[in-house]
Image: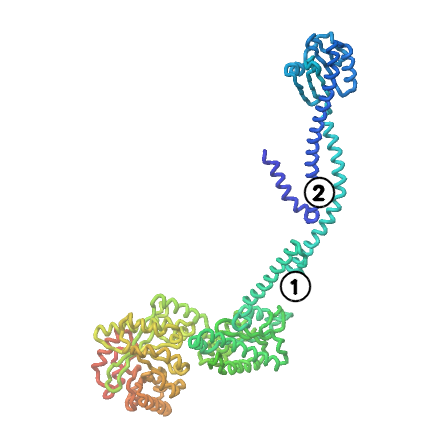
Amino acid sequence: MPGAPSSAVAKFIDLLPSWLPSLRTRFVLLVAGLFLALSVVMIMVASYLDLRDEEQRAVSDARAIGATVSRLAVPHLTNHHYLILEQELESIAASGVVELAQVLDPARAVTIDSDPATSYFDDLEIHPLVKQALDTGIEQTRQSRDRVEIALPVRDMDQNSVLGAALVSVKRSSADGILMTIWGRNIVITLVLLVFCIPVTFHFAANFVRPIKALTLTAHTVSAGNFDAPFPVERTDEIGVLARAYRDMVSTIRHNMVRIHELAYVDPITRLPNRESFRQHFTASMFDEHGEANRTAVLFIDLDRFKRVNDSYGHDNGDALLKDVATRLRRLLNLRLREGGKGEGDGPLHGPLAAPGAAPSAMVARLGGDEFAIAMPADKTLAGIHALAEQLVQCIEQPLEINSLTMAVGASIGVSVFPDDGNDYTAILKNADIAMYAAKRTGGNRACFFSEVEGDSWSPDRIRLEADLKKALLRDEITIAFQPKVDCTSMGVVGAEVLARWQHPERGLLSPGSFIEVAEESDLITKLGSRVLELACEQGRFWLNHGLCLPLAVNVSIRQIEKPGFTTRVLDVLEQTGFPAELLQLEVTETVAMADPERILEATKPLLEAGITFAIDDFGTGYSSLAHLQRLPFNSFKIDRSFISGLAIDRHSRSIVQTIIAMAKSLNYEVVAEGVETEDQFRFLRAHGCTTAQGFLFARPMPADQFEDWSKAFEKRPSLASGDARDQTQASPSAAA
């Protein structure tokens, strides 16, 4: 397993940080380890060098002794004094340094050595080094672990001749012994130095780690939420650089957290709390510290006609209007708080969120778009909330001066009360929204309490009906019916009003009264109106292709007119279907026309130029201004059926109808009477100059195929003026429908 040791070392290194958590301890151990490692390396190098020195010393000693023996041997070999030479060699060997000293006289084949056990008379084997020295005439050396052997030629310097050869064998010291001596000495030195260095290292490590500890402590303080903790930025070393970088990072984090908090809880345009901030504030203050419900009112505010400001003056001016409205709301609420005994800053109108269990306090927030909300402590009688709601309506309806432009909006306010109208935030806000829509349906610019709204108007059946209507528009379940318009003089069919019908898969054929209100509230009226217009123009083109030229009137709602692209959509439908623009009439209710005459004028101008005519529907129910009527591009009045039904019994209705007809004549308008059901009503209208009538007296709304048959039969019948209207109606195919 060759990889096992390295794997074990790697695991050991990985475990070290868990065993040694202190940075100072790690630093000291690191220094000590490095010192020991360097000491081992140093000892190894010293051992190697000492061994080399000892080897060179042994060779030098052997060479010196060999040279001495060679010089001593010259006279003795010349004179053949072998005995004296033998004695001198024995004395040299007796010193203990030389293991063997030997001289060879090749002339007589005599070997003289320092060994007392042998004699020059003995026949001794010639040493290989001696033979090599004689053959080569130069020094020969051989080393082993325990000795150094050197053979030198013995030269007669006077005669420059080789007399023989000398051999010297010198003992070497044991390498193990030398190493033990070296290691022992160096280990003692290393331990002494280590004992001295460790305390010094601890001291320097403590000084080195101290600023890091300070920086670590600061980091813990910052992580606990205190972003104002001091950093050791005065240092000029790397710690100072790190501290400054850390300080800059914390400053950036602090700035980003403030920005994130603003994005999460503050509306960027009005600087009011946003929807989430309002939800958290309301939820936190729902109950007191004893678990009892805090009675709190939520006022849901939706600006009336704000879309007109955006469309007419641009979103920049629209945002400026929202800021001014927010300022008005804050100012009014602060005034209410001061009057109620609270200081201006006591209620968190746009401050921090309320803590759980805190006493209920006021807050104004922008929920989005042109919607605002106010949470306000409420008494049992709700008198203060009623007064506040009325003040809010009056406050917002005052004209605003923005960028030298005068703008005016209203406010529809819905109010729900916790815990009376719901047991949680979602229910309270939903019910306040419902009450706001109820206020808007009655004309807007007023407040409505949820307790005043009819309970069945927002029942689950209505919700299901809205969902079914969405599906109906996708599945093409919407159809149309036609109610004829009859000329009061000629008794000819001069047009028809197009009415929507819904072929519901479960409830059968539904009239507009069953679903128009739901469509208006859910904004499905735009798609519904567009579909009805398409069907009407397609049928009108079909009749035109078959010889029936019939003007058609189609109702349009304020939501359709306010929708961007309304004009383009109408013209596109005419172009796609090929229905002539001069045969199309669009009906707008009087209330819608008078509520926003400028918007009506803007939307209708290109349509009028294309040839489309316009009618004021339900005339007499609104508050028309003659000045506006002269400016608006209408071609006819449709007298509301409520006045027609009262002609027989109410003289005021007769006076109103006469006045409308007279005014229409003076303005050169056509007059259409809706809901004509009796012959007396018809005769009165014709006698006073009404030009056109429609109602059950002639026919009920009918599908296109029935309308064709009815119109052919109606043209052949006697005039209502000369016959019995009741008989005529009973004979009509459509009367039985």
For the residues labelled 2 and 1, say whether their Cβ atoms are less than 8 Å apart: no
Position of 237 with respect to 548 (left or right) is right
Question: Callout 2: few (<14), some (14-19), or many (20+) C-alpha neighbours within 10 Å?
Answer: some
Amino acid of disc 1: Asp
Work out how far the residue at label 2 is from the one at label 1, CA to CA, in angstroms.
Answer: 40 Å
Amino acid of disc 2: Ala
641 versus 181 height, above or below: below
Position of 349 with respect to 524 (left or right) is right
- Of the 4 image quadrants, the one containing the C terminus is bottom left
Residues 592 and 719: in front is 592
Query: Image quadrant of residue 697?
Result: bottom left
The earlier-in-sequence mark between 2 and 1 is 2
Q: Is residue 415 visible?
A: no
- Mark nearest the camera among 2 and 1 is 2
Callout 1 secondary element = loop
Question: Callout 1: few (<14), some (14-19), or many (20+) C-alpha neighbours within 10 Å?
Answer: few
**Label disc, if present, on residue 228 of the rendered structure:** 1
Residue placed at 63% from the left, 44% from the top?
A: 14
Residue 522 spot, x, y in % from top left: 42, 72
Residues 163 and 241: in front is 163
Residue 22 spot, x, y in % from top left: 69, 49
Residue 717 spot, x, y in % from top left: 21, 82
- Of the 4 image quadrants, the one containing the N terminus is top right
**Label disc, if present, on residue 4 of the rendered structure:** none
Residue with the mark numbered 2: 32
Q: Outermost residue, front direction? A: 158
Callout 2 secondary element = helix
Q: Is residue 186 visible?
A: yes
